[in-house]
Amino acid sequence: MDRGGYLRRGIFVVLSFVLSLLFTVTACLAVLQLTVFDKNFFRRQIGQSMYAENLMENLQEILVSYGESSGFEEAVFREAVTMDMLRADVYREVSSLYEDTERKIDAGLFFNRMYQSLIEDAEKRGYILTDEDKEAVIYLARVTTEAYIDIVSLPFTEQIFSILGKLQRINSMGLIGIVVLDLFCIVLLLICLPSRRKKMEGIMHATAGSFLLMCVPALFLTFSDSLKRVPLTGKALYILSQKYIQGIVQTNLMILQVELFQNYI
């Protein structure tokens, strides 16, 4: 092979390698944009993991324990919150991760429902409530409201909100920049390589290399049991975390399918 042949071969290898890395970075940024930085993706995982239903089960167990210790009817605490009310508060919590919303969990609605239910239950059973009794009912309603907030609240919402917006902007700008670099390298490859076959081989090798690199995080997230060692409290949050990771893996696999399809065009 003459010197020109070695030079073309070197250009082919370098451009294919660089393009492969750029394709990989592009795919990773796209996965983040479609999952971590997408509020609707999070909301879908909330629904698919039955997060609200699992929360309701946990919440009712705790509220019933308050009922048993306070002497009120168990049904009062079971009916204090509806599934629609709980879902609305959960979605407000999700929105608070992405938007600067002042209103999160509607604690006032829960407190009023609980207070009215306790008063009605006492009056239905013939009790005449004194001011001291009403103060005790207010205290019980306040305690159960705090328990409701603790259960429904997502962990570290304020900390996540403070950095998520900045990271989303960085990711969006990075994605635009990396796509421009992708196009530049593709044009450079098409210009530098002489034959049509070599040009197609360069792009195919770059896509195949990116495909293999993107398989690594997908396989790691799929088969890793690291989540089992994370001290997540509560069944609902644990199942949501598993479903969230599965959603990221599925998005990653979708992009891999696109790359594989491109490789066979």
Image (cartoon, rainbow, N blue to C red):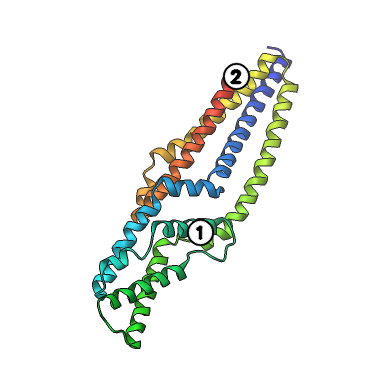
Identify the residue shown where x is 34% and y is 54%: 235
The answer to whether residue 230 is seen in the rendering is: no
Q: Quadrant of residue 137?
A: bottom left
Q: Residue at x 26, y 67 (%)?
A: 74
Residue found 40% across the figure and 52% down from its top: 51
Label 2 is placed on what type of residue? Ile
Q: Is residue 250 above or below residue 187?
A: below
Residue at far bottom of view? 131
Between the residue at mark 1 and the residue at mark 2, the CA separation in whole angstroms equals: 44 Å
Which is more toward the observer, 119 or 104? 119
Q: Nearer the viewer, residue 125 or 259?
A: 125
Quadrant, the N terminus: top right
Q: In this view of the protein, can residue 121 be seen by the observer?
A: yes
Q: What kind of element bears circle 2?
A: loop
Ranked by sequence position, the earlier of labels 1 and 2 is: 1
Location of the C terminus (image quadrant): top right
Of residue 106 and residue 49, the one placed in the foreground of this image is: 106
In the image, farthest residue toward the top = 1
The reply, left or right, for residue 258 in relation to residue 179 is: left
- The residue positioned 62% from the left and 29% from the top of the image is 17
Q: Is residue 33 left or right of residue 12?
A: left
Mark number for residue 265? Answer: 2
Q: Which residue is mark 1?
A: 92
Amino acid type of the residue that numbered disc 1 sits on in the rendered structure: Arg
Q: Is residue 221 left or right of residue 67?
A: right
x%, y% of residue 203?
63, 23
